[in-house]
Amino acid sequence: MKNFYIALGVLAITMPLVFCSSSSTDRVEPASKKETNVKDNPSDSILTLIAVGDIMLGTNYPSAAYLPPNKANILEPVRDLLRNADLTFGNLEGTVLNEGGDVKQCSDPSKCYAFRQPEYLVDYLKDSGFDLLSLANNHMGDFGNAGRVNTKRILKEKGIKHAGLETCPWDTIHVNGKVIGMTAFAPNSGCLKLNDYKKALEVLAELKKISDLVIVSFHGGAEGRSRTNVTRKTEEFVGENRGNVYEFAHLMVDNGADIVLGHGPHVTRAIDCYKGKFITYSMGNFATYGRFSLSGVSGIAPIYKVYINKNTGDFIKGEIVSIQQLGEGGPTVDPNKQVLAEIKRLCAMDFPEVLWEIKDDGTFKLK
């Protein structure tokens, strides 16, 4: 850890950033100097982002029985929805590794929640349009360094940008004439630390130097069906400091983040708009198979489509598609729109000062 930050200081002098998916010798300029569009948006001023929460498409540990049968793609029912934006983001909740790795210690291996997703599942992420993945979470270290290294390797091979590890703190993508930077934080080993505000601000400042817009992701807040509220206080879970996510998100916006995307509690939480910037504090379990509790509020989640001004990063409007996970898991559109009702309820409870207009069709904006 200490050596990493020493290296970070050296890099700040010799080069702007080290990227996860690019060569460490590549310099990425803001779009005013270099433009290479990956996806195109016909609007001159709007950038659209789809954001979802936790993704774990199946694990072959402790048994291949925890994989969807016949290599099924559990994202297929929502594939077209996920592809319908300039950028698509999610939290990859677990390592990508066919076999091996140093599994974390568990008292009962049959009940060990260690996630090892086979490499073929990454093709489903790519096919569904995922451009950006956060690796900052408590399951990215489930199979030690071998798991982290292989996850980064396969995502790079497939062209999916990723960030959030000490060895992979940030990445950038060119979209719609802009350089979009992403970084991510979590309280867990090997990740950029959610609770180290000094280093978080250093990372954000460096990323802003080479980006037109910056997305900050975090994995924080206590877990469980009773933890749907944003407390605005430091939260703990099984003795671990899971951060003050309200304070962290506002700090990031105060220092230049254009959008903040939260995950970690495994339930959906309220949305916020601070200084014109969109914040979601948790997007719940989006696509999780076999090893996640999906009862009650744990089995419903949103697909957010957010429209922002690509020149200022300011929130314009948004859309919520309600999904549900039934049985062993996998997202399908929820005709009863349960999570939409939950978001309305939580926003009124936790952020009454933010005057949201959330309609029954899922569209939302500020009043």
Image: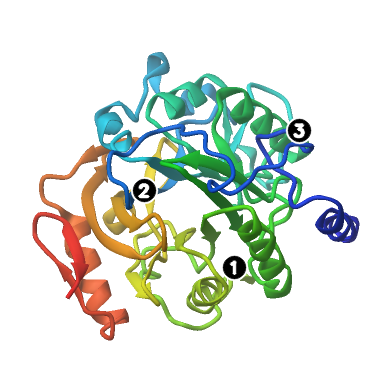
Q: Position of residue 254 (x, y in %)?
A: 53, 77
- The quadrant in which residue 9 appears is bottom right
Other residues around mark 3 within 10 Å, as few (<14) / some (14–19) / many (≥20): some
Residue 229 shows in the view: no
Residue shown at 69% from the left, 60% from the top: 206
Other residues around mark 1 within 10 Å, as few (<14) / some (14–19) / many (≥20): few
Residue, disc 2: 49
Q: Amino acid at mark 2?
A: Leu
Give the foreground label among 3 and 2.
2
**Whole-Å distance between the Cαs marked 3 and 2?**
31 Å
Residue shown at 27% from the left, 56% from the top: 296
Seen in the picture, residue 295 relative to 247 is either above or below; the reply is above
Pick whichever, 47 or 237, lies toward us: 47
Q: Amino acid at mark 3?
A: Ala
Pick whichever, 361 or 336, lies toward us: 361
Q: Position of residue 253 (x, y in %)?
A: 50, 72
Query: Closer to the N terminus: mark 1 or mark 2?
Result: 2
Query: Closer to the N terminus: mark 3 or mark 2?
Result: 2
Residue, disc 1: 238
Residue, disc 3: 146
Query: Closer to the N terminus: mark 3 or mark 1?
Result: 3
Does residue 336 appear left or right of residue 146 in this picture? left
Does residue 235 appear left or right of residue 344 in this picture? right
Q: Amino acid at mark 1?
A: Val
Residue shown at 26% from the left, 39% from the top: 326
Give the foreground label among 3 and 1.
3
**Whole-Å distance between the Cαs marked 3 and 1?**
26 Å
